């Protein structure tokens, strides 16, 4: 085997320069509508590539621009910068609205996940219809979590990556707390329907608002 052939064969197993890896990751994210994980990205790249490092560099390079590289759960996507979302409003078509029961149920799942149906009903103070849960499952706002290791092994519910992507959240802990919602004027200081814990785990006092005041947080689906 000639020296040239040896060099070409070795080059097949060498990772591309990081700048080239960034370009590859950028191309994948632009061509993919749904968020993709770093493992899925790396599987499409040449042997020896480091998708995680390329993503970190690409995310930094897009900071402050019209579109950003964002993490959604354990996946990545290119999305319009949050402060420029108003430019996209004319392109948004409302095809389906959530009922108040669905909004309340979604809020409880988001702030208390993983949560069972019985726990949702305890917090809401009323029963949860099968149709409400089915609607949220169909819209891919929530999904089944692990079963509880308690009698009956009830199934739990958690929010989905689709939910996080829609609201521009990296994970559920990025949801605003009740104090932040009240400061923004989204909640009123009224006696609570049930005991609602804030996202940081602190229990709120009796001045907390009921969950049915959180519909402005989730809006229309």
Image: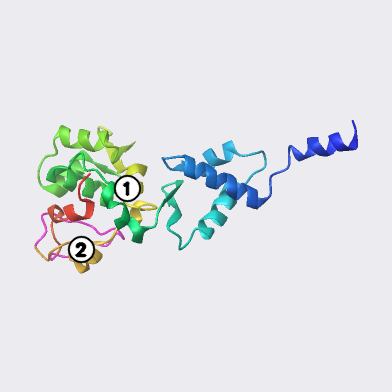
Q: Secondary structure at mark 2?
A: loop
Pick the residue in front: 57 or 142: 57
**Quarter of the figure with residue 161:** top left
Q: Secondary structure at mark 1?
A: helix
Residue 200 versus residue 95 in the image, above or below: below
Residue 90, horizontal then vertical, whole percent: 26, 50
Q: Which residue is mark 1?
A: 166
59 vs 184: above or below: above
Residue 105, x across and y down, in percent? 19, 45
Q: Is residue 90 left or right of residue 124?
A: right
Instruction: Tell me the crowding category of disc 1: few under 14, some 14 to 19, or many 20 or more residues within 10 angstroms, Cα based.
Output: few
- Left/right placement of residue 118 relative to residue 60 reads left
Distance from disc 2 to disc 1, alpha carbons, whole Å, reads 27 Å
Crowd rating for badge 2 (residues with CA inside 10 Å; few <14, some 14–19, many 20+): some
- Looking at the rendering, the stretch of residues picked out in magenta corresponds to 191-207
Cβ–Cβ under 8 Å for marks 2 and 1:
no
Write down the residue under mark 2: 204
User: Percent x, y for residue 138?
Assistant: 26, 33
The percent coordinates of residue 66 (x first, y second) are: 42, 58
Residue 31 visible in the shown view:
yes
């Amino acid at each position: 085997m000639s020296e040239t052939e040896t060099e070409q064969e070795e080059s097949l197993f060498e990772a591309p320069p990081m700048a080239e890896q960034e370009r590859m990751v950028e191309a994948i994210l632009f061509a993919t509508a749904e968020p993709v994980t770093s493992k899925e990205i790396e599987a499409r790249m040449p042997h020896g590539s480091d998708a995680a490092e390329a993503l970190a560099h690409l995310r930094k390079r897009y900071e402050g621009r019209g579109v950003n590289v964002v993490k959604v759960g354990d996946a990545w996507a290119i999305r319009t910068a949050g402060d420029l979302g108003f430019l996209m409003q004319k392109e948004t078509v409302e095809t389906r609205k959530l009922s108040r029961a669905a909004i309340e149920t979604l809020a409880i799942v988001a702030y208390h996940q993983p949560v069972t149906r019985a726990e949702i009903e305890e917090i809401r103070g009323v029963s949860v219809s099968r149709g409400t849960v089915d609607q949220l499952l169909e819209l891919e706002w929530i999904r089944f979590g692990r079963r509880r290791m308690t009698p009956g092994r009830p199934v739990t519910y958690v929010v989905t990556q689709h939910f996080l992507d829609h609201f521009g959240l990296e994970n559920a802990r990025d949801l605003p707390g009740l104090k932040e919602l009240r400061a923004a004027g989204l909640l009123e200081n009224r006696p609570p329907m049930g005991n609602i814990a804030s996202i940081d785990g602190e229990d709120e006092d009796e001045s907390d608002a009921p969950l049915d005041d959180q519909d402005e947080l989730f809006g229309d689906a």
